Amino acid sequence: MSAIYVARSKSVAARMLGDQMMIMSAKDSTLFDLNDTASAIWQAADGQTPLEEIVEREVCANFEVKPEEAMEDAKAFVHELAGHGIMVVSDRPISEAEAQAKMRINVEESAKAEESVKAQDGKKSEGPK
């Protein structure tokens, strides 16, 4: 299995409220309320530490969970957040500049796709004349 690296996007609003992390996506304004485990992964996602190490150090060491189960859940979690433009996932370490460049590209691609869908919807809703 190749290493997975994760980095937090700087283009999100993220705040700890009590012991829960709240994150809003700049891409689609989705609001996420992270549980303790997800918050631990989010806070440790520096782009330089492999996800497997984060899971071992932050999840398995602090929560009663099997390493294999924790890793599968962590992968699903980071890919979900990446889909919303909140996190960057890579097979190699991620610099801060690289993370921001990837986020900008993802947001631009999402905006173009959204415009395309709206244009298609507009064409479909035009009835016969």
Image (tube, grey):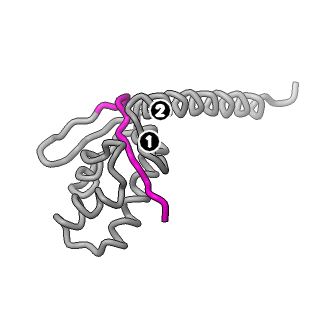
Question: Residue drawn at (44%, 57%), measured in percent from left and top?
Answer: 3
How many angstroms separate mark 2 from mark 1 (CA)?
7 Å
Q: Main secondary structure of the magenta part?
A: loop
Q: Is residue 127 above or below residue 39?
A: above
Q: Find out whether residue 50 is within the magenta segment.
A: no
When asked about the image quadrant of residue 72, the answer is bottom left
Amino acid found under the numbered disc labelled 2: Met
Residue hosting label 1: 88
Amino acid found under the numbered disc labelled 1: Val
Residue furthest to the bottom: 66
Q: Residues within 10 Å of mark 1 (few under 14, many from 20)?
A: many
In front: 16, or 56? 56
Q: Position of residue 98 (x, y in %)?
A: 45, 32
The answer to whether marks 2 and 1 mark residues whose Cβ atoms lie closer than 8 Å is yes
* Element assignment for label 2: helix
Compared across the picture, whether 44 is left or right of 51 comes to left
Residue hosting label 2: 103
